[in-house]
Amino acid sequence: EAQVTQNPRYLITVTGKKLTVTCSQNMNHEYMSWYRQDPGLGLRQIYYSMNVEVTDKGDVPEGYKVSRKEKRNFPLILESPSPNQTSLYFCASSLTSGSIDTQYFGPGTRLTVL
Amino acid sequence: GQQVMQIPQYQHVQEGEDFTTYCNSSTTLSNIQWYKQRPGGHPVFLIQLVKSGEVKKQKRLTFQFGEAKKNSSLHITATQTTDVGTYFCAASGGYQKVTFGTGTKLQVIP
C-alpha cells in the first residue's frame, strides 16, 4: 500500500532533549516536506527536499534540522526542543514537486515539549 | 515572503445549506491546490487549479481560480455531515516552497 509513515505518533519530552521524528515513503517520490500545524496558523512548511542530499528551508526552519540521505527517508531533528515547538507535525511527499504535484501526508506526530 | 489568507476561519452551517471558503494571495500564483482534513486526520488532496479563471467541479464541490491568479474559492452545494473538516488552500509562486492558507473549519449541523 502506497503510504507515508511517521514515527512516533505521539511524543512528550522535556526542553533540551534531542529528538528525531522519522518519515518514510514507499512511492519513490522525489519531493518530501515537513509541516507543523498550530491552531489558527494552518500548516507551515519547515523544510523541504527536492531529492537526495538536496534540502531547503521553508517558512519556519528555526530550531529544526533535516537530512535526506536516502530517497525514502526524511527525518526531522530537534536538537534542543523548546516549548514553542509543541505542535502537530506532518510529513508529506510528492512525485516531483510539492508545488505542482499532489502531496501525500503522513498521519502526523503530536509533540509536546515540557 | 508569500502570504495566503483564507476566510472565514470557521463556518457553521445547517445540513443542506451551501458553504464557501476563499483564499487570497498577495502575489500572483502559478497554481493553487485544495486539501481537506477531517477531524483527527491528515490533509488529503482534493484538486489543483492552474489556469487563469479555471473552474473545476467534483460532485457538489466547485473550485475556482481567479482571473488574476491571486485568489481562489471552494464552494460546496447542499452540505452533508460528511463534509465536516478543515479545508486548506495551498499556493505556490512558482518555486518549490509551498504556502498553505490558515484553513476554514466547517461544522455541519444535522
Image (cartoon, helix red, strand yellow):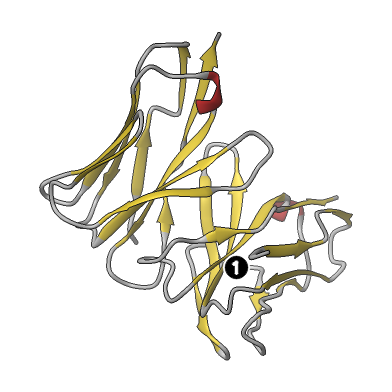
Residue B79 drawn above or below residue A23: above
Left or right of residue B39, residue A47 in this image = left
Out of A48 and A31, give the one closest to the viewer: A31
Q: Quadrant of residue A67?
A: bottom right
| Residue depicted at 61% across the width and 44% down the height | A38
Please count the marks in the image. 1
- Residue B43 in the image: x percent, y percent? 55, 48
Out of B99 and B109, give the one closest to the viewer: B109
- Residue A44 in the image: x percent, y percent? 52, 55
What amino acid type should be assigned to the residue bearing mark 1?
Glu
Residue B8 drawn above or below residue A112: above
| Residue depicted at 43% across the width and 76% down the height | A96
Q: Residues within 10 Å of mark 1 (few under 14, many from 20)?
A: few
Left or right of residue B75, residue A66 in this image = right
- Residue B46 in the image: x percent, y percent? 43, 46
Out of A107 and B92, give the one closest to the viewer: A107
Viewport quadrant of the C terminus of chain B:
top right
- Residue B45 in the image: x percent, y percent? 47, 51
Viewport quadrant of the N terminus of chain B:
bottom left
Secondary structure beneath dot 1 equals: loop
Q: Chain letter of disc 1? A: A
| Residue depicted at 69% across the width and 38% down the height | B40
Q: Quadrant of residue A6?
A: bottom right
Q: Which residue is mark 1?
A: A62
Residue A64 drawn above or below residue B53: below
Residue A41 drawn above or below residue A2: above
Out of A54 and A95, give the one closest to the viewer: A95
| Residue depicted at 50% across the width and 74% down the height | A57
